[in-house]
Amino acid sequence: MDWRWQKMDSLSKRELYAILAARQEVFIVDQKIRYVDADGRDFTSFHLSGWQNEELIAYLRIIPLPTAGHYKIGRVLTRPAWRGQGHGAALMEQLLRLVPREFGSCHLTMAAQLYLEKFYQKFGFVSEGSVFHEEGLPHITMSRSIP
């Protein structure tokens, strides 16, 4: 897997197109979520993507939050054709290798789809608060501190 950690300005047109297409494929088509994907946050986000033979396999973005050292993980996906092969776990492992190097000590948070709660717990994320609905799907806030 070819892992790429980039700000939006360093993404090529093809990379950006593949990322946006994958987000539509997973969230709008596959999960039938009705939302505006182009939320303006991509400009300040860090984008982690996994590629095989120039095909996007897995992706997530990290949004810097107003509080120093705090970041939100979002748009986590593995494309449908590549699921069940460990790419989601590899994406999270890569994230947890990169974050300390890029940000130092920090705090990560995410609104995880509830069915993935145990998956994220394997990577040290802890559930916080009650289940809530976002875009019609049950979610739970999860977080992890990076020492």
Image: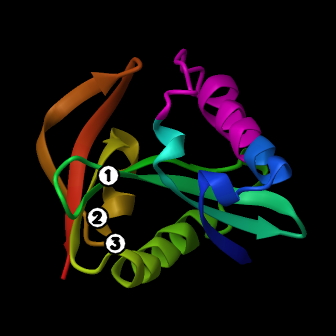
How many residues crowd around disc 3 within 10 Å: few (fewer than 14), some, or many (20 or more)? few
**CA distance for labels 1 and 2:** 6 Å
- Indicate whether residue 62 is drawn in magenta: no
- Indicate whether residue 24 is drawn in magenta: yes
In the structure shown, which secondary structural element does the residue marked by tag 1 occupy? helix
**Which quadrant, please, contains the N terminus?**
bottom right
Q: Quadrant of residue 56?
A: bottom right
How many residues crowd around disc 1 within 10 Å: few (fewer than 14), some, or many (20 or more)? some
In the structure shown, which secondary structural element does the residue marked by tag 3 occupy? loop
The answer to whether residue 131 is left or right of residue 47 is left
How many residues crowd around disc 2 within 10 Å: few (fewer than 14), some, or many (20 or more)? some
Image spot of residue 130 (x, y percent): 12, 35
Q: Give the residue at x 19% y 33%.
A: 131
For badge 3, the amino acid type reads Phe
Image spot of residue 114 (x, y percent): 33, 40
Location of mark 2 (residue):
121
Residue at the limit of the structure toward the right, as seen here = 53
**Disc sitting over residue 123 in the figure:** 3
The answer to whether residue 103 is left or right of residue 5 is left
Q: Give the residue at x 28% y 64%.
A: 121
Picture layout, residue 44 above or below residue 87: above
Residue nearest the observer in this picture, 15 or 31:
15
Q: Give the residue at x 53% y 54%.
A: 60
For badge 2, the amino acid type reads Gln
Whether residues under marks 3 and 2 lie with C-beta atoms below 8 angstroms apart, the answer is yes
Location of mark 1 (residue):
117
Q: Give the residue at x 34% y 81%.
A: 100
Q: Which span of residues is magenta-colored?
A: 19-40
Picture layout, residue 84 above or below residue 14: below
For badge 1, the amino acid type reads Glu
